[in-house]
Image: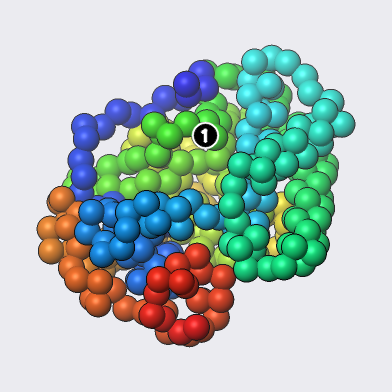
Amino acid sequence: MLSRGLKPKPYPSDRSIGWSFSTLNMFQNCQRQYYFDRVSPRWVSFPEGKLRELRAIKSLPILVGDAVHKTIADYFQTCLAGNEMLNNDFYSSGEEIFQHVLKTSITEEQRQLEQEAYKAKVEEATKKVSDMLHAFWGLDLRSEVADSLRLNPEKSFIDPSGVSQFYGEFRIGDFRGYAPPDLVYLKKNGHHEVISWKTGLHNVDGFLMQLAGQVLFCIYSFDLPPERLTAKVVNLSSLEGQPVELQGSSSTLERCLERMRREVAELVAKFDNPQMRVPKAMEEFSLAPTQNICTMCKFKSICEGPQ
């Protein structure tokens, strides 16, 4: 179930192609990877069972991010319920969550590295989880948000990690986007703020596009007034990185939306029937331009790209 608080607007079912940062980022980096990962198995000339196995593979950085996001979401759900959580309980919870996702996932590093090398990678990833959770606990923002959630639970939103029915959909006319915010809370000045937690390399352009999607979701799905809406990225792996912030009524948001429309148009052009998601032939989805993109790709074994 979704947390109590702000509720997203329900939309009628529609299979047409929409914008999401992860999808379009994959498509722009390697169209062939997008084909193997996102096109319906019924259209891909490869055994469906094997394809699904490959799609389920994750990377250690993704698992690190999943664990950190879920730990933070669980903490704020505790605050939303009016309860407290001690820092040691928070750290222990994060470690347990990371160990659980490790045990229940297959990673690309696990498939490609020798046992000892993989063990070293896991130890490094475990330390990253711990470091980022300690960084989170030290933020003044944490206390501010926790107090707001206890005082204004009905005016808040926490991304329900693991709830497959929620995809953060918003619609603007015939344009569809998917950008669930990690957190929305009411500030003391009466404005809502969107927080997007990050755990990887500090990518200002990518962060801005993701943040723009989340702001648009809040405007068009939560019906929050744009002039009373702000947003920012908090990168727990690089707190000193260049700030990424956005105003709900800014011209920057308008430019981001225009870019989203262009990106979706480029993707739609690869489909014979976009409404039913029937793709063009695999050869129409170009290979990655450089070998670097292919290094840890989970589809290397079935792809003819650079090896």
Who is closer to the viewer here, 158 or 212? 158
- Above or below, 235 against 91 in this view is below
Measured as percent of width and height from the top left, residue 30 is found at: 40, 73
**For residue 78, what is the image quadrant?**
top right
The residue lying at 54 percent from left, 59 percent from top is: 207
Mark 1 neighbour class, 10 Å CA radius: few under 14, some 14 to 19, many 20 or more: few
Residue tagged 1:
162
Determine whether, in the image, residue 238 is placed left or right of residue 295: right
The residue lying at 31 percent from left, 63 percent from top is: 46
Measured as percent of width and height from the top left, residue 196 is found at: 58, 46
The residue lying at 47 percent from left, 72 percent from top is: 300
**For residue 60, what is the image quadrant?**
bottom right
User: Which residue in the rendered view is the most extreme toward the top?
Assistant: 82
- Above or below, 292 against 5 in this view is below
**For residue 100, what is the image quadrant?**
top right
Measured as percent of width and height from the top left, residue 43 is found at: 22, 59
- Residue 19 visible, this angle: no
Q: Which colouring convention does the figure follow?
A: rainbow
- Which secondary structure lies at badge 1? loop
Measured as percent of width and height from the top left, residue 82 is found at: 69, 14
The residue lying at 55 percent from left, 40 percent from top is: 182
Determine whether, in the image, residue 153 is placed left or right of residue 1: right
- Above or below, 217 against 256 in this view is above
Determine whether, in the image, residue 241 is placed left or right of residue 176: right
Who is closer to the viewer here, 221 or 25? 25
Q: What kind of residue is marked 1?
A: Gly
